[in-house]
Amino acid sequence: AQSVAQPEDQVNVAEGNPLTVKCTYSVSGNPYLFWYVQYPNRGLQFLLKYITGDNLVKGSYGFEAEFNKSQTSFHLKKPSALVSDSALYFCAVRDLGDYKLSFGAGTTVTVRA
Amino acid sequence: NAGVTQTPKFQVLKTGQSMTLQCAQDMNHEYMSWYRQDPGMGLRLIHYSVGAGITDQGEVPNGYNVSRSTTEDFPLRLLSAAPSQTSVYFCASRDQTGLNTEAFFGQGTRLTVV
């Protein structure tokens, strides 16, 4: 079975400060890891993914994430947050040998001006 | 470049009514899926399909049916709506080959069952 945990329901940061959204996962095999963002009343938009290779993955809108196999984590980061980054963020995992994509409960990010 | 298109965007049903949520994709993706989104629970998989004629159950399939007669379309049917099915529903598709494994989502259908 595969699962994802996002330990923080909410993250609040000031504009210009670093932003981190935490994610840990559990799979039986090799993980495919994803981050998605959802703006109010919209669908999910893909931000970045880890499939294989370099543990530091860069994605859209200046976001990056670091895959840590020993800690089974895939935290999302942005060096300098913008007010427009305020949204709901989802981490997701798929086992290499499975079709299904499993999501975390989501983390609401609020960036204050 | 439409991507994944869901209709309708909003729907109100009475308990016991049936309806079909439509999903279509124009990317020739083999894999399609339906999720429901509820506050604090993330997205939960209802049903999925790995190709035309092939469907399977996800985490929360009860009360829902699906079919996949073409690659493009993957409708979700509510057989007899219940208030517990009040939710936002998302359809997603992805390529099954290579490393292009990210899913593309529709804009969602907000369903209220009264």
Image (cartoon, rainbow, N blue to C red):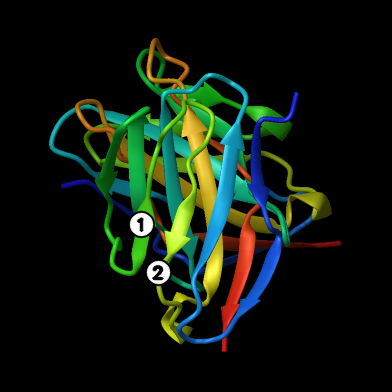
Residue found at x 37% / y 13%: A53
Circle 2 crowding by C-alpha within 10 Å: few under 14, some 14–19, many from 20: some
Vertical order, B104 against B8 (above or below): above
Residue A110 drawn at (x, y percent): 70, 64
Residue B16 drawn at (x, y percent): 45, 83
Total number of numbered discs in the rendering: 2
Q: Is residue A25 visible?
A: yes
Vertical order, B10 against B46 (above or below): below
Which residue was labeled with disc 2?
A: B79
Residue found at x 38% / y 13%: B97
Left or right of B17? Residue A26 is left
Q: Chain of mark 2?
A: B
Q: Give, as a three-letter code, the residue at label 1.
A: Asn
Residue found at x 47% / y 26%: B71
Nearer the observer, B56 or A42? B56
Residue contact between numbered discs 2 and 1, judged by CB atoms under 8 Å: yes
**Image quadrant in which you'd find residue A29:** top left
Which residue was labeled with disc 1?
A: B65
As helix, strand or loop, the secondary structure at mark 1 comes to strand
Residue A83 drawn at (x, y percent): 82, 55
Residue located farthest toward the right when viewing the structure as drawn: A113
Residue found at x 42% / y 33%: B69
